[in-house]
């Protein structure tokens, strides 16, 4: 399961977090605590996890008998946040770790107090399922995107300050909304099923750039850590990179499958894409693939296919739906349709045990 990346680094799966009873749809990590993570699910709940990283001794059989130290990650469920009455589709955590926002197919957003696990406020204003939500860098603004084709900008007490629903708005579902981390030039980026990516100026809520080039609906958009570029991906299997200042396409990466989620590494020039059962990692300088992360089940099935033994697969494939890096760039969390969160760790040789 370990995947090679340059300079003898490897990424290996070190744990699975089990607690949801339906697809994991969204993940959010905390800025200053790599061991706290939030997951949202089609089971209508959000789970707050605390991670415990440890070394476990395993006995090896065969020629290399002996004891091997294996790094594992276990997750303890600290709280389960319940209140939505339909799927939770997206989640974001405030930078001070006090609050979380969730978006649901029940048409509402909820602001949660993470200390008490209770809903502080319900945000009512969308006419259909809410598919995406995000906090601004200073946590004073909230943006949401919906199947009603609108983008709402809210303050933290649940008042809509602006709705993007004029001639410049998306002509179909708004699938994803994200704030740029760049506070000097505040923008939000949105993607839609109308094949477009849009960049909005948050000073006056006007459309700054309309980014066209996708040949099918766009599922995901993500902004680079420095706010200079964004990436988008969807049904056409292309991860497109855009210059946010110029509003120009920079390049595109072939994923060979529908892209369900995208995220940049916080400290390496990498883009990760959730493509079917796998996570693909691209180096943005070389445009080459750094690695592909697959679950043990999908690896075994790939080997069977290559071996010429076409075995009838049971049930639906396990698809990766969402990803989030820890802010130190050492752990990639991924959510899947088998209801699990998998913890992938980047291991650098000679790093301290």
Image (cartoon, rainbow, N blue to C red):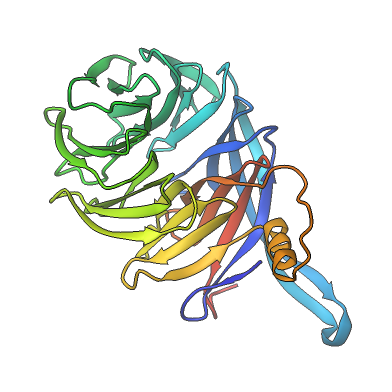
Residue 339, given in percent of the width and then of the height, sits at 67, 39
Say whether residue 114 is visible.
no
For the C terminus, give its image quadrant: bottom right
Residue 134, quarter of picture: top left
Residue 92, quarter of picture: top left
Q: What's the residue at 45%, 17% (across, down)? A: 120
The one of 161 and 318 positioned closer to us in this rendering = 318
Residue 141, quarter of picture: top left
Q: What's the residue at 22%, 18% (across, down)? A: 161
Residue 200, given in percent of the width and then of the height, sits at 19, 35
Q: What's the residue at 46%, 63% (across, down)? A: 281
Of all residues, the one furthest to the bottom in this rendering is 63
Say whether residue 312 is visible.
yes
164 up-or-down from 263: above or below: above
46 up-or-down from 52: above or below: above
The one of 281 and 217 positioned closer to us in this rendering = 217
Residue 288, given in percent of the width and then of the height, sits at 40, 71
Residue 125, given in percent of the width and then of the height, sits at 35, 12
Of all residues, the one furthest to the right in this rendering is 62
Q: Is residue 252 left or right of residue 90?
A: left
Q: Is residue 18 left or right of residue 98?
A: right
310 up-or-down from 275: above or below: below
Q: Is residue 315 left or right of residue 26?
A: right
């Amino acid at each position: 399961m370990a995947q090679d990346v340059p300079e003898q680094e490897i990424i290996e799966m070190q744990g699975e977090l089990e607690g949801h009873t339906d697809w994991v749809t969204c993940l959010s990590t905390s800025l200053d605590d790599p061991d706290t993570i939030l997951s949202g699910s089609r089971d209508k709940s959000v789970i707050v996890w605390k991670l415990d990283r440890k070394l476990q001794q395993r006995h090896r059989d065969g020629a290399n008998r002996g004891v091997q130290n294996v790094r594992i990650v276990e997750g303890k469920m600290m709280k389960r946040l319940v209140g939505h009455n339909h799927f939770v589709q997206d989640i974001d955590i405030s930078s001070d770790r006090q609050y979380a926002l969730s978006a649901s197919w029940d048409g509402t957003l909820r602001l949660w107090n993470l200390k008490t696990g209770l809903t502080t406020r319900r945000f009512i204003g969308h006419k259909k399922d809410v598919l995406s939500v995000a906090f601004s860098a200073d946590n004073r603004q909230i943006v949401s995107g919906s199947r009603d084709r609108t983008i709402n900008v809210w303050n933290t007490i649940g008042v809509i300050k602006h709705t993007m629903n004029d001639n410049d708005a998306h002509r179909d579902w708004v699938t994803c909304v994200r704030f740029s981390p760049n506070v000097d030039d505040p923008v939000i980026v949105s993607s839609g099923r109308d094949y477009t990516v849009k960049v909005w100026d948050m000073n006056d809520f006007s459309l700054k750039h309309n980014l066209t080039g996708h040949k099918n609906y766009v599922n995901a958009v993500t902004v680079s850590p420095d706010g200079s570029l964004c990436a988008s991906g969807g049904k056409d299997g292309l991860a497109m990179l855009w210059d946010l200042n110029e509003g120009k396409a920079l390049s595109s990466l072939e994923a060979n499958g529908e892209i369900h989620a995208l995220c940049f590494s916080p400290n390496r020039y990498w883009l990760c894409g959730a493509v079917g059962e796998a996570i693909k990692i691209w180096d943005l300088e070389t445009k080459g693939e750094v690695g592909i992360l697959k679950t043990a089940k999908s690896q075994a099935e790939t080997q069977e296919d290559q071996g010429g033994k076409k075995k009838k697969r049971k049930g639906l494939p396990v698809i990766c739906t969402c990803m989030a890096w820890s802010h130190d760039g050492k752990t990639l969390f991924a959510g899947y349709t088998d209801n699990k969160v998998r913890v992938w760790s980047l291991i650098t040789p000679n790093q301290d045990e």
